[in-house]
Amino acid sequence: MTCSPRRCPPGAGWASSFRHGLGAIRRLSAPRRLLELVSPNPSRRCGVTEATPCPTASDRTRLDVCHLRPAPVGAAKVCEAGRPTQNDGDMPVAWWVAIAVAATAILVASGTELLHLIASRQYFPALPAEPEPNGRPQVIVVLGSPTRRNGEASASQRWRTEIAVRSRRTAGDGLLIFTGAATLGAAVAEAATMASYARAALGIPKERIVLETRSRSTRENLTFSLPFLERADRIAIASDPLHAARARRQLRHLRPDLFARLIRTDDYRPFEHLGIKLGSAVYELTRPLLRRAVPSLRNHFQGRTRKEP
């Protein structure tokens, strides 16, 4: 598009544009000129019509100088048939969508990490338990998690087992109590699956492993493990940080004397298994509401249990 010779200068130089701008200021009192400046119809500016092709970048610069008003950011050009298109300097919509998605992902990941970091430091006795001279062992309770239907260890089970193994005081110390019955239609108990992974992948000897295959909930994980916990001088609970914090809170109400023997586990490492952390955070935050609003969820996770063959 080319502007009307009466309104726009033929040259694109700064001096010519400046002189023409001063002339336009003197003509602002003309009613017709004011109407063109404030008109919402783009076709009334500098003689643009629906049949006029889209202006080039240099033409738009001269148009802005003529009207003494900068082109709004994100404004659309007027092309043939009045269809708006994106300006050359505008950021594509796909970029804005990508930025929004990236910002949301960063916020979600940061919030998830913060929740697990806080949980890893909650519900411990004021004074940490110290080893007793009688030589009683350290006991680490590995909370149960559903096994895959094919009998293989799930990502959550592998992570909990790794947390338990790396939380031992020494390489040859610690009794690992794997808990959990066969749930969600699995043919093998959760405890047996995690114990097999500990022996095969992490090299834990069989004499350091105890199986508890009756429990179907976190509270039962602790209740059925009490006979072993009573013989320990220090107790650790291995799971993801949010789940382990809930278990420590339950042990405090269940057996305050055993709660006093709790020690920390190496359960939090930044951005480790972020997907599992996100799922755990969603579950722990919505668990109180879901247990009241949808009681069938409890039966789904705990009712479909059968004895280990």
Image: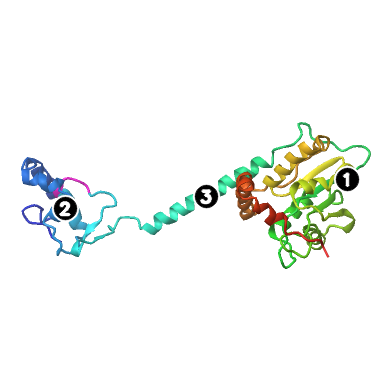
Determine the image quadrant of residue 98.
bottom left
Question: How much space separates mark 3 and mark 1, taking CA atoms?
Answer: 44 Å
Image quadrant where residue 92 sits = bottom left
Identify the residue at horizontal 19%, vertical 45% (top origin).
Answer: 69
What numbered label is drawn on residue 41?
A: 2
Does residue 182 belong to the magenta stretch?
no
Label ID, residue 134: none
Q: Amino acid at mark 1?
A: Pro
Q: Which image quarter holds the N terminus? A: bottom left
| For residue 284, side relative to residue 26 (left or right) | right
Residue situated in front as seen by the camera: 203 or 197: 197
Residue denoted by label 3: 106
Describe residue 4's horizontal placement relative to residue 193 as left or right: left
Q: Residues within 10 Å of mark 1 (few under 14, many from 20)?
A: few
Amino acid type, callout 3: Ile
User: For the magenta stretch, what is the residue range?
Assistant: 66-70
Q: Is residue 168 visible?
A: no
C-alpha separation, residue under disc 2 versus residue under disc 3: 42 Å
Question: Is 68 a magenta residue?
Answer: yes
Where residue 212 sits in the image (x, y, percent)?
83, 53
Mark 1 lies on residue: 227
Say above or below: 184 vs 27. below
